[in-house]
């Protein structure tokens, strides 16, 4: 049997869902293959979305019409803003999802999306002809045909679960691994690596002594991710709790290290440095006696509670003792133990910046298969891969995003240019233009681009245009409105600041303690819509820094975008180090900027490359 | 692309005892084979050993008897195969040797191309490559010592370590942003301590480098004094020439004269000013005196020369900041001025009484000047120098650090500090070539002369 479509998406996790939705928004007919119809957009690890840099990705997905932001806004049980003592560029929204409800919400969006068909089937082999992907053969024997295929298999490729001395094949707790597809990818000539990630024990809500922990209340202000969500306080939220590991915890873990598969060499894959297992923390930070543990409910109507900070693959009997050594958890019951999962990933340096596999036109990869970790990282890649698959399938050219345009651009450039040797997690420090790439302006940065490509629908576009215009109008108004001789005293009093006559209201607003609200109130004007007001304040208050960062972008643009011609013969460049020559020849980066980020290519290699380019230009001139 | 072989005369133009023709590139020794006849065939010549032979042209006619040495890759300055032919000096002969090399397949090198190849082959980093150019331009032993300090990587090491300090601080700030939950934040006082530590290192680099820079451009030494006090005589004495027009008529030296010379290893840029007189009707002289005043303000060293047989010139004004050296001339004509009194009046750092027409005083007055010039240059031995590019980058770094200070004072949060810390690190990175910048590359290699 043959099923034909424009785009095939393998997997229905966070990457797969956004990929399918993006392709469908462009008008493609999309077939999604998933091992189980009931396992769409699951959250096998911490059911939380957002946090530093991750929130930025969620906002970017939203700016391009994706589903993640809208879904979490509708289904969270706890939301707050992190980093509020710092500036707006690093403010980060973070929400705890109601785990099953979130997944159901995304599944509903996916299943109702026009142009998307979801099939319960396991992909077994990528079909290709003459260097192009042509479809997928499934375990059922069905052949799915399409000129573009997006693979988003998460941790399922040859997945193996570890808990102490016990190891079983599986992609997630209770779900089978995907064995065949890995070999199919390898047979295409792709190099695969092995990574490891882990999760924590889940406890029963009623077995926890909440009194012994510090309560972390959700925000009492309305907060949402999506530009389209209504800004209002949820009817109900739950608190999270903070506790600490004890000296006893440390002792138990150190005594049982030889029973941890990580430490006795059973697990070969590299784990994430930024999300270390509790065993790792005890060994690597041996001088620290205690570590933070966040105790987070997983939903309103389910009893599971997530233990953030206690990811482990120790045997279950040790896990019990570890958990019960933590204040507040002395009587805690583990509903599901923590475990580690090892899985294959494709070395992402084999991809183009479009997420298309260099050596096979029409094959796109997104999510954990590219070596990333996190739902947000997966969703963002999925969106771009789905978009490009749709473009490829329709005969168009795939698109890329620069490091100065979004965290998504940074993420993809890091993966493709640098590669990764551990599960890659997004941080704000990875973005050199952090002050420009804020979560508050994701829409201003990306929605027009998304609109041009067809990702952004009419209603989002109209709402965007209204907001943008309102922001621009207000800034212009503030610039032109000057404080009159007879007004200075009144305004000074209203704001508690000494305001001289002749100042523009922009200059007044730029003062650290002045907000827009009181200025407008003094003028007798209604408050602006919250999103508009915040945007005006940020753009006015940080104008100097924003300008400087923009100048920095321009300064670097020349080298960043300097093209490396396709016919450059790197092998002949004796002045470039042998290692760099080999890497340049193999990767063929598109620009000098990309080349400069390839590990093993030194600044002097780049300098030499530039002198070669100059030499070449002068010869051809 | 670098597969060709380049050739140039490596010794300075002019007649000398020896002239060196240098070739670099994969065909250097095969070119040598076509132009050099010796008992040992070229292909059997050992690396880094001199061989005596004859240089011939394509018709086997002998051009010169010469020594040749092959330095095989990568053990050479450029990292390529290098050949040097040491012939007898004499422009015509040397040019014939170059022509023979050209006929043998080499091409004429561009200015700086040897150094550029050394850089391209990873033999030198940017600062080192630059200091080769500085070394070539160095005009005195002390200046050369400073340039070779750069060549050994002294500047690179200092700058690299400073950049490391900036990056360490940044990484703490970055961690605060991304792992705010788990990390203790730095207090504003910690920030200020770190900042002032880094700033003082930048200032020290600037100071040390500027001392090195003085060695390069010469210590600007301005001669001041009333007309006919003997300034031009003194100038000529230091220079050992009759450069300035000396006549007994007051006001002969109308414009300022600039001369470069080296005194006991310290390069001086001597500037003889038109006499500083408050009143004159001569327009040209007025202009000259205006320029003289400016020269005094910008000088590293001011030398006041007075005729001690005359009254103190009432119109002599140096400005309160200038602390000159005082030379009381014409001791043979009697004394109306006391060294101590005049010295105090001018705020002089030291004084000497001489008679410049007496050759026995010449050594004394030269030693006097040399001692103060040495002191002014300071402990520059073992230092490094800053060229314009370094200076510009360091100043940019300092500006960025000052902005960090302002941001701390205004209570801005750490991501704003990071913006300017990154700019500071970038400026430092440009000095050592860690941050690549095309314009910088162009500037560096265009300052070279041929044959290096």
Image (cartoon, coloured by chain):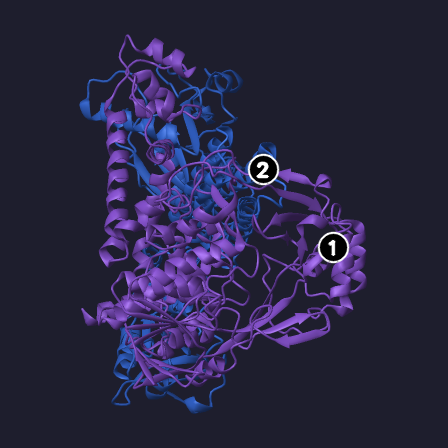
Element class at badge 2: loop
Whether residue A78 is situated above or below residue A567 in the rendered picture: above
User: On the image, numbered disc 1 is attached to which residue?
Assistant: A323
The picture's colour for chain B is blue
**Which residue is rendered at x = 45% and y = 51% of the image?**
B140
Is B344 in front, or is A286?
A: A286
Is A434 in front, or is B310?
A: A434
Element class at badge 1: helix
Image quadrant where residue B84 sits: bottom left
Label number found at residue A217: 2
The picture's colour for chain A is purple
Residue A272 is situated, as x and y percent measured from the top left of the image, at 58, 62
Q: Quadrant of the C terminus of chain A?
A: bottom left
Residue B35 is situated, as x and y percent measured from the top left of the image, at 33, 85
For the question of whether residue B253 can be seen, the reply is no
For the question of whether residue A494 can be seen, the reply is yes
Rounded to the nearest angstrom, the CA distance separating label 1 from label 2 is 23 Å
Chain of the residue that carries numbered disc 2 in the rendered image: A
Chain of the residue that carries numbered disc 1 in the rendered image: A
Image quadrant where residue A66 sits: bottom left
**Which residue is rendered at x = 36% and y = 79% of the image?**
A359
């Amino acid at each position: 049997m043959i099923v034909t479509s424009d785009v095939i998406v393998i997997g229905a996790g966070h990457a797969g869902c956004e990929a399918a939705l993006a392709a469908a928004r462009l008008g493609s007919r999309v077939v999604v293959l998933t091992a189980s119809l009931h396992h769409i957009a699951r959250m096998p690890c911490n059911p939380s979305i957002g946090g530093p840099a991750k929130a930025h990705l969620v906002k970017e997905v939203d700016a391009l019409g994706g589903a993640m932001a809208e879904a979490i806004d509708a289904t969270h049980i706890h939301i707050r803003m992190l980093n509020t003592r710092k500036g707006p560029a690093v403010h980060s929204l973070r929400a705890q999802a109601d785990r099953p409800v979130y997944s159901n919400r995304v599944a509903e969006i996916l299943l109702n999306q026009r142009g998307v068909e979801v099939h319960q089937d396991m992909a077994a082999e990528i079909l290709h002809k003459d260097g192009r992907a042509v479809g997928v053969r499934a375990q059922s024997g069905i052949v799915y045909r399409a000129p573009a295929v997006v693979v988003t298999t998460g941790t399922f490729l040859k997945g193996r679960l570890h808990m102490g001395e016990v190891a079983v094949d599986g992609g997630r707790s209770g779900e089978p691994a995907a064995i065949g597809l890995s070999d199919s990818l390898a047979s295409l000539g792709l190099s695969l690596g092995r990574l490891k990630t882990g999760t924590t024990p889940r406890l029963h809500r009623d077995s926890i002594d909440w009194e012994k922990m510090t309560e972390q209340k959700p925000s009492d202000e309305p907060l949402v991710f999506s530009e389209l969500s209504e800004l209002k306080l949820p009817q109900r939220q739950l608190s999270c709790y903070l506790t600490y590991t004890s000296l006893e915890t440390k002792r138990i873990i150190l005594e049982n290290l030889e029973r941890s598969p990580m430490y006795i060499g059973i697990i070969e894959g590299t784990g994430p440095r930024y999300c270390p297992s509790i065993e790792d923390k005890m060994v690597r930070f041996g001088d620290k006696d205690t570590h933070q543990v966040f105790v987070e409910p997983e939903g309103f109507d389910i009893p599971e509670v997530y233990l953030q900070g206690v990811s482990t693959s120790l045997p279950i009997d040790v896990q019990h003792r570890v958990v019960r050594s933590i204040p507040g958890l002395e009587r805690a019951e583990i509903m599901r133990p923590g475990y580690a999962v090892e899985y294959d990933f494709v070395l992402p340096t084999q991809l183009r910046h479009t997420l298309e596999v260099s050596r096979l036109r029409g094959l796109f990869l997104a999510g954990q298969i590219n070596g990333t970790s996190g739902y947000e990282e997966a969703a963002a890649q999925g969106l771009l891969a789905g978009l490009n698959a749709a473009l490829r399938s329709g005969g168009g050219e795939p698109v890329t995003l620069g490091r100065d345009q979004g965290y998504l651009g940074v993420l993809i450039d890091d993966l493709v240019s640098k590669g990764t040797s551990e599960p890659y997690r997004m941080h704000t420090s990875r973005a050199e233009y952090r002050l420009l790439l804020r979560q508050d302006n994701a829409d201003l940065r990306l929605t027009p681009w998304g609109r041009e490509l067809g990702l952004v629908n009419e209603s989002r576009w109209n709402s965007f245009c209204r907001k943008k215009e309102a922001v621009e109008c207000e800034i212009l108004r503030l610039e032109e409105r000057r404080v009159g001789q007879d007004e200075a005293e009144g305004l000074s009093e209203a704001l508690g600041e000494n305001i001289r006559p002749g100042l523009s209201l922009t200059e007044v607003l730029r003062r650290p303690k002045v907000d827009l609200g009181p200025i407008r109130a003094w003028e007798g004007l209604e408050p602006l819509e919250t999103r508009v007001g915040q945007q005006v304040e940020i753009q006015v208050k940080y104008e100097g820094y924003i300008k400087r960062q923009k100048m920095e972008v321009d300064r670097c643009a020349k080298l960043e975008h300097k093209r490396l011609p396709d016919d450059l013969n790197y092998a002949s460049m004796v002045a470039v180090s042998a290692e760099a020559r080999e890497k340049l020849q193999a990767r063929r980066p598109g620009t000098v900027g990309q080349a400069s980020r390839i590990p093993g290519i030194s600044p002097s290699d780049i300098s030499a490359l530039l002198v070669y380019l100059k030499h070449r230009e002068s010869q051809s001139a | 692309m670098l597969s060709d072989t380049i050739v140039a005369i490596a010794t300075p133009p002019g007649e000398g005892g020896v002239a060196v023709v240098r070739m670099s590139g994969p065909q250097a020794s095969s070119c040598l084979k076509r132009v050099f006849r010796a008992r040992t065939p070229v292909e059997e010549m050992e690396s880094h050993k001199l061989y005596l032979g004859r240089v011939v042209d394509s018709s086997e006619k002998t051009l010169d008897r010469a020594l040749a040495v092959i330095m095989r890759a990568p053990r050479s300055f450029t990292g390529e195969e290098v050949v040097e032919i040491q012939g007898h000096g004499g422009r015509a002969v040397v040019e014939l040797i170059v022509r023979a090399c050209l006929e043998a397949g080499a091409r004429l090198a561009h200015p700086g191309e040897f150094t550029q190849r050394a850089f391209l082959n990873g033999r030198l980093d940017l600062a080192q490559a630059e200091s080769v150019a500085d070394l070539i331009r160095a005009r005195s032993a002390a200046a050369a010592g400073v340039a070779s300090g750069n060549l050994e990587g002294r500047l690179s090491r200092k700058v690299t370590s400073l950049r490391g300090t900036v990056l360490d601080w940044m990484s703490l700030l970055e961690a605060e942003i991304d792992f705010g939950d788990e990390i203790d934040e730095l207090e504003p006082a910690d920030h200020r301590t770190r900042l002032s530590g880094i700033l003082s290192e930048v200032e020290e680099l600037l100071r040390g480098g500027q001392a090195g820079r003085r060695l390069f451009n010469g210590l600007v030494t301005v001669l001041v004094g009333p007309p006919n006090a003997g300034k031009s005589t003194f100038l000529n004495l230091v220079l050992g020439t009759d450069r300035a027009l000396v006549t007994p008529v007051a006001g002969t030296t109308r414009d300022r004269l600039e001369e470069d010379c080296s005194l006991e290893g310290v390069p001086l840029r001597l500037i003889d000013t038109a006499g500083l007189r408050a009143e004159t009707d001569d327009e040209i002289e007025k202009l000259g005196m205006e320029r003289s005043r400016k020269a005094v303000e910008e000088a590293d060293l001011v030398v006041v020369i007075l005729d001690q047989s005359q009254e103190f010139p009432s119109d002599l004004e140096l400005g309160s900041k200038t602390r000159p050296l005082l030379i009381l001339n014409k001791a043979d004509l009697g004394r109306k001025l006391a060294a101590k009194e005049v010295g105090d009046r001018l705020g002089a750092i030291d004084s000497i009484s001489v008679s410049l027409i007496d050759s026995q005083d010449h050594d004394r007055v030269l030693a006097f000047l040399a001692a103060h010039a040495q002191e002014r240059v300071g402990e520059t031995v073992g230092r490094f120098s800053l060229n314009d590019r370094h200076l510009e980058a360091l100043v940019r770094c300092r500006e960025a650090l000052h902005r960090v200070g302002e941001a701390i004072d205004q209570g801005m949060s750490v991501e704003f500090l990071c913006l300017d810390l990154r700019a500071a690190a970038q400026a430092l990175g440009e000095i050592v070539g860690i941050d690549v910048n095309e314009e910088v590359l162009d500037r560096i290699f265009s300052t070279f002369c041929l044959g290096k």
